[in-house]
Amino acid sequence: MVATLLLLLAPGCDRDGGYYVADPNSDYPFIQDLGEFRIISAEEQEDFSSLSDEAQAEDELGRKGVYYGGLGAPADPSYYGGATFNFLGTGGDVCVVVDPEAVFWNQAQSPQATTSDYLYLDETRDDADLDLDVGLTAYYTGSPGVEMGGFELVYSDPSGVDHNLSFSECLQIGYTRLPGSHSGRSTLEYCTVGTRALQGVSMTGVLDTFLLPINDGVAHYALGVFEGNCTDVIQPPLGLDYECFLQRETDGARDIPDEQATDDYCKDPDNEWNYACLEQMYCDKTKKLNEYCEDHFDDEDAPCIDNGVHPPADDAAADVGL
Amino acid sequence: MHALYLAILGCSNPEAVDEGDVTAKVILPKAAVTRTVVRAEEEDLDGDGEGDGTYAYTYEEVTDPRLIGPVYVGAFSAIDELSFPFTHPAMGPQINEGSYGDTYPYGGATVGRLDFACYEALACKVTTGRFSDYDSLLDHFKNNIGVPVVDGNGEEVLNGETMRERCYDYFYATSDEEMAFIGEERLAFSEEGDNYVADVVLHHTNRIDGMVLWGFMDAPELRTTAAEVALNGAFTTCDPNGGNIVEKYNEAFVEGRAQYDILNSPSTYVQPGDWVADGKAVVHFDSELNQTGDVELNLNFDYEGE
């Protein structure tokens, strides 16, 4: 009997799952209050680039524009981590957008149809997932910079039974058309917050750390608060370029050397792929990654994976009678 | 050894569930199904012995349990007698502009539910547990509702055999047992004196001593002017744009389905003509959470509008 028990227990002893838990990084807090954000106006959104100094500039009161940051892991993985930030209601719609690293169009999570010619190279260990929420500051239950919270309050009915109520103003609709959804890892999250009756009222935004990358334990992200409805603010063509609205969030550096950005293969000096560079190549309208892959189809070093639907060059030539 | 192992696993899952079944008797006065109905008779204006597609209407007051629409029953914390012209479950705080607070029901059930009965013309108009067979259903729509059932070509469905064939074809079915909207044994209400009564079970309901059962009967639309007769038979608790989307050959329509928040926001759906509970069906439990006493849910308030 003892031998049987040992046999049952044995398979469970060869791993502890620690590989999947990110280590703390002293340079990045696991809970952070980012302070006040300014609303990026509709005028500023014309010819908008998240990389411009104007977009990232603080206003005279020190309120942030587009912000690039990073969240780390807690020493105790059982603690919830994340960031909070505030902004004032404008009296109209406000669009809050966060883009966690890295990119969602890669081979692991690609929205590319299986009939697309190429999948793109991926590093599955560098993906972060931050869940966005927004509500009235007065309803926020956490302690900014100390402890994460939410916008759930308790209603006790006449029989004394408690019900949790959500006072979130950030409505995200999922594939099933149900509210309360969040995007998957690496994918942009955004919501339109109606502040018609809340002009000048303080709103709190929350980024809940849902997944930390296990390569460096830091969830880099870009974050901004914009005037208007998100359907007007983001406007991605064909749905693929959401990734390009806030760019280079991948390592937060935003300072890809020109020589590397123009390098054919976007490789760092240590021969590792630079995903900020790849994202730029994807988003650059003059050098789309699909076109790049088309040009470098036979190059084994290119960050493109043949999806098996691209006709071999010889066959294509035969098709046109060459 | 394996038995011991399984026994150990079983012991680690103590249950402390306060959910259970709650039973009640739903009582609906005959007055709720005593209505002036519309009878449609196809006219033969050219005298060729065949109907020409136009109808003449006659009116008559009848008492017929087929006029009972879906009955929605919920268990709630308390009754609010002030907010509406009818009793209503107590509500939580108003969160969204332009809508009332949620009622947070502890559980719910229906006596008869909305069902799709094979023809587009019947979408959002058929309740289960009301019809013994196809002929009974066709007769109801012709002689109570005033809108004879028509097929996809607009031709009146004249007998139950035709409807059976259509239903078997539509649902890929092989027996009447598969049609939830007919069946003598499925009839939910029975006659008791001046009332129609039915038993209802609210499964998996949070058992809170002193909670109140409340509900309403969604009565079918029943207008008596010729211009409006086409609207008859519909239920306000049905979403005509929801449910299965059907595209078969030359047919394209939506089957309809019940609204999803009927017990959470009942005031949205209670309309003039519906019959509403009096709010006095209190449920008690003993210390073991066994229901004590019989509960009668009287739907005896005829809501005629504000």
Image (cartoon, coloured by chain):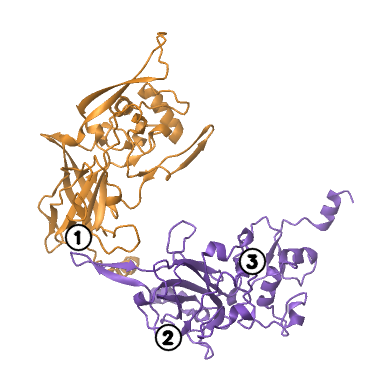
Residue closer to the observer: A170 or A215: A170
Q: Is residue A305 left or right of residue B163?
A: right
Which residue: 18% across, 64% down?
A158
Q: Nearer the viewer, mark 1 or mark 3?
A: 1
Badges 2 and 3, same chain: yes
Residue A250 visible in image:
no
> Image quadrant for the N terminus of chain B?
bottom left
Which residue: 25% across, 66% down?
B15
Residue type at mark 1 is Ser
Q: Residue furthest right?
A: A322
Instruction: State the image quarter where residue A100 is shown.
Output: bottom right
N-terminal label among 2 and 3: 3
The orange-tinted chain is: B
Q: Chain of mark 3?
A: A
Q: Which residue carries the number 3 mark? A: A107
Residue A7 visible in image:
yes
Q: Chain of mark 1?
A: B
Q: Nearer the viewer, mark 2 or mark 3?
A: 2
* Dots 1, 3 in contact, CB < 8 A: no
Residue closer to the observer: B40 or A47: A47
Residue B165 is tagged as none
The purple-tinted chain is: A
Q: Which residue carries the number 1 mark? A: B77
Can you say whether B305 is above or below A243 in the image? above
What is the secondary structure assignment of the residue under circle 2?
loop
Residue closer to the observer: A69 or B301: B301
Residue closer to the observer: B34 or B195: B34
Q: Residue A136: percent from the left, percent from the top?
A: 38, 73
Q: Residue A198: percent from the left, percent from the top?
A: 40, 70
Badges 1 and 2, same chain: no
Q: Residue B163: percent from the left, percent from the top?
A: 39, 27
